[in-house]
Amino acid sequence: MEEKDRKIWELAQEAFGLDTTPFTKLGSFESEIWEVQRQGIPFILRITDTAHRQPENLVSEAVWIEYLAKNGIPVAIPIQTHAKEYLVISQDPPCYLMLFQKATGHTPTHKDATDSFIVSWGEIMGKMHRLSSDFSPPVTFTRTNLLTSFSSLWNLVSDKVDPSIAPYYESIMKTCQAFPTNKHYYGLIHYDLHMGNFFVDDGKITIFDFDDMQYGWYVYDIAMTLYYWFWGADRKGSSLSTDQTARAEDAVCFLRLFLAGYTKAFPLPDDWLEMMPVFLVIRQMELYFVFESRFGTISDKSSPLGKLKYFFQDQVLNKRPHIPLEVFKKDNFKDLTLYF
């Protein structure tokens, strides 16, 4: 074990009363994720770089998750220290530690995604947005917002990417700035509620990874589920990625099921069809900007990392819609009761 990891491990053990059994590192893209044990029960220890988040951001995340849990949303809740704190601050090495319940079950695949599963997924998101519309945050509550985080990413790459992207980015920002921000449209969103960020256990969903939660338009959250619905197909270059007619039919089918669940809990604004394609473009740009800022030019374009980076770049440079635009015709949803 490296000295850095040993110090973190000892601090976490003391603060949270963890077992002495070895940890298992699960991932490290934005934060390091470890599986740890307490009294033989698995938990998730998240290690956040001090450059990534501020303490007040992380405490606010915990407050939000607790609020959702108390109101019936199936989430992996944060675990407090012996001192009744959500957050442990490490000085050497500098980082922040948080402990969470470990969700039971497994990462769902499209085999798990029955019609009833998709409806349930949508209903949970609708309930989250309804709770967000009624949420009164404490004065210390601090999270960023969608356009600020988007512009921060742009600032990292604006001098590195093709100049044609600048007016495209500016037009998207201008369009979003005109969208309503009242409580029917805008509030705290998960931002990344795809199937990689919840587990399913005998049909029951448990949501985790609220690290990127922020203020934004509720429709953005719905758009992200649709974006990643095709993630596996796009990575594999399957027929669902290349056959746009089949892709459009699948997208409409998914959205109709998802929104049937969502609107049981929270109605849609009547202009959601105009908003969603814009948010899909933002996600295209966000992913491209992240890869550009972190990896720059990748010489091996056939590598898994290279394929992803240049897939995102091609979408943005050539303004390729991630979802065929015919999906967002009103006739596809006119028989559903969706609106407030």
Image: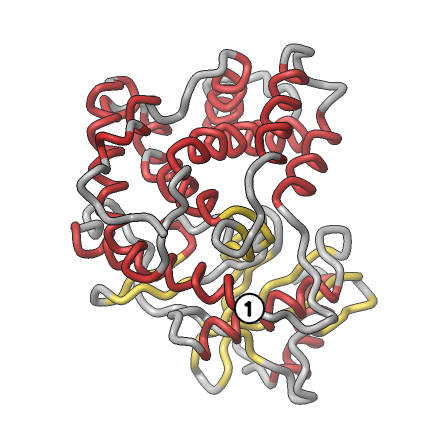
Residue at image point 51% right, 63% down: 132
Counting from the top left corner in percent of width and height, residue 13 is at 64, 80
In this rendering, the answer to whether 30 lies above or below 12 is: above
Q: Amino acid at mark 1?
A: Phe
- Coordinates of residue 95 in the picture (x, y in percent): 74, 62
Q: Is residue 57 left or right of residue 105?
A: right
Q: Residues within 10 Å of mark 1 (few under 14, many from 20)?
A: some
Q: What residue sits 74% from the left and 65% below the top?
A: 55
Q: Quadrant of the N terminus?
A: bottom right
Quadrant hosting residue 137: bottom right
Q: Is residue 43 above or below residue 261?
A: below
Residue at position x 47%, y 49% in the image: 218
Q: Residue at x 64, y 26 (%)?
A: 292
- 30 left or right, relative to 152: left
In the depicted view, which residue is nearer to us: 76 or 261? 261
Figure quadrant of residue 245: top left
Residue 91 position (above or below residue 110) = below
- Whether residue 321 is situated above or below residue 58 in the rendered picture: above
Mark 1: secondary structure: loop
Q: Position of residue 76 (x, y in %)?
A: 45, 70
- Residue 10 coordinates in the image, percent (x, y): 69, 76
Report the residue marked by disc 1: 135
Task: Name the foreground residue: 110 vs 20.
Answer: 110
Left-right relation of 158 to 227: right
